[in-house]
Image (cartoon, helix red, strand yellow):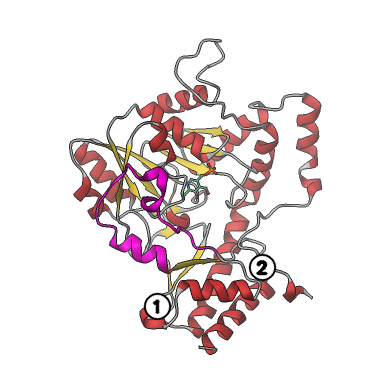
Amino acid sequence: MASKKTVPITRPTLEAHGAYAPSFKKIIGSGMLTTAGHVREFEERTAKYLGVKYCVATSSCTAGLMLVFKHLGLRGEVIMPSFTFLASGLPVLWNNLTPVFADIDPHTYCLDPEAVEKLINKKTAAIFATHVFGVPAEVEKLRALARKYKLKLVFDAAHAFGSSHQGLPVGGFGHAEVFSLSPTKVLTAGEGGIVATNDKALATFVKAGRNYGDMGQNDITHVGLSARMPELSAALGLRSLRKLDANLKRRRAAAAYLIGELAKTEPNLHFQKIPAGAETTFKDFSVYVDPKTLGYTRDDLHDYFASRGVTTRKYFYPPLHKMKAYRGARKGSLAVTERITKNVLSLPMYAHLTKADMDRIIRVFKEFVHAR
Ligand SMILES: Cc1ncc(COP(=O)(O)O)c(C=O)c1O
């Protein structure tokens, strides 16, 4: 009874366990469990894929971002979105910086450069943008602002390994871009992060920083973390990287099919805009439910899907400026953020989502719409 099984929001697309066996055997046999050959190979291959000079593997995206901000040595304010994952701002807080929340574009859900510029003042030290659900942020406009006001520019690229902007892979923009390799990401290492940069000093700092701040000289040069990537994770990541393009193709085809079919049922349902010249990973596949035109809410849709065994998620809800850890933040007008956070719903998405599961999602959606 396949239809009784819950459709998950996402699952990592893994190979049969035998595919991992040779490298796992090698790692166990060598006794080198952390930051050895597989991590180095993973760093080299990801740097090549992204077209950047350096990739440094860490234990998580959060740890990578903490080290990037530590290296930048900033004081004052960092302008960032509130519509992002709850952990996005933690590297800012850990570095004793003040988040300043700027509004987002109503179609791409990424940071709105005009809203950013309005918030720049003497205390502003950096702009920190998220490529939301894999859709690239407005890199040129943000870069122009960073140049004009002499600010650092960092990207939370957690969702975006495999995204591109004007033919260039996400990864080479700003001072650094940091990816997450947790199980919900298209490129996964179980857990992990990748700091991508063209800045040698930054890469060297993060390499030492993931190892307490020690470059192997037994002399800590700065305050670091214990944030290395295990070899087994790097081996998983290497296999995931080999399959990345094929998995991205399947996700994009799945998203195109879902968009076409859902829009047939509900022409006024909206989807996240992918700007011309950009490609997304569809780390999340979301629909925008406008209660005024549709007569039902995002929450109604969420609850109906849940009652019919289809898992959906309210990403990102609540937004950061509503969370206790961020209460010291400054903020601009967040009217678009407030609207998007209430109306966006992520539906199941993964590379091995079957046609039968997609048709079930579409059927449940049709039932929901027609019952109203
Ligand atoms: C936008 C964003 N930033 C940061 C993170 C944190 O990543 P990690 O769990 O690798 O630290 C996530 C995790 O999902 C995320 O979605």
| Secondary structure category for the residue under label 2 | loop
Between 326 and 348, the one nearer to me in the picture:
326
Instruction: Indicate the quadrant where residue 349 lies.
Output: bottom right
Q: Is residue 198 visible to the viewer in this orientation of the structure?
A: no
Q: Position of residue 293 (x, y in %)?
A: 37, 82
User: Which of 142/306 is in front?
Assistant: 306
Instruction: For residue 322, say whether it is visible.
Output: yes
Task: Indicate whether 160 appears above or below 298.
Answer: above
Label 2 or label 1, whichever lies nearer to me, is 1
Q: Which residue sits at x=54%, y=10%?
A: 217
Is the CB–ligand 1 distance for label 2 below 8 Å? no
Residue under numbered circle 1: 291
Q: Quadrant of residue 350?
A: bottom right
**Mark 1 secondary-structure assignment:** helix
Q: Is residue 345 left or right of residue 81?
A: right
Q: Nearer the viewer, residue 2 or 40?
A: 2
Kind of residue at disc 2: Val
| Label 2 packing within 10 angstroms: few (<14), some (14-19), many (20+) | many
Instruction: Identify the residue at horizontal 55%, vertical 22% (top origin).
Output: 211
Q: Residue tagged by mark 2?
A: 7
Sequence-wise, which precedes: disc 2 or disc 1?
2
Where residue 341 sits in the image (x, y, percent)? 40, 62
Q: Which residues are magenta?
A: 313-342
Graded by Cα atoms within 10 Å as few (under 14), some (14 to 19) or many (20 or more), the crowding at tag 1 reads few
**Where's the N terminus, which quadrant?**
bottom right
Place of residue 296 in the rendered image (x, y in percent of width and height, measured from the top left): 45, 80
**Kind of residue indicated by mark 1:** Pro
Report the residue at 42% width, 69% height from top: 343
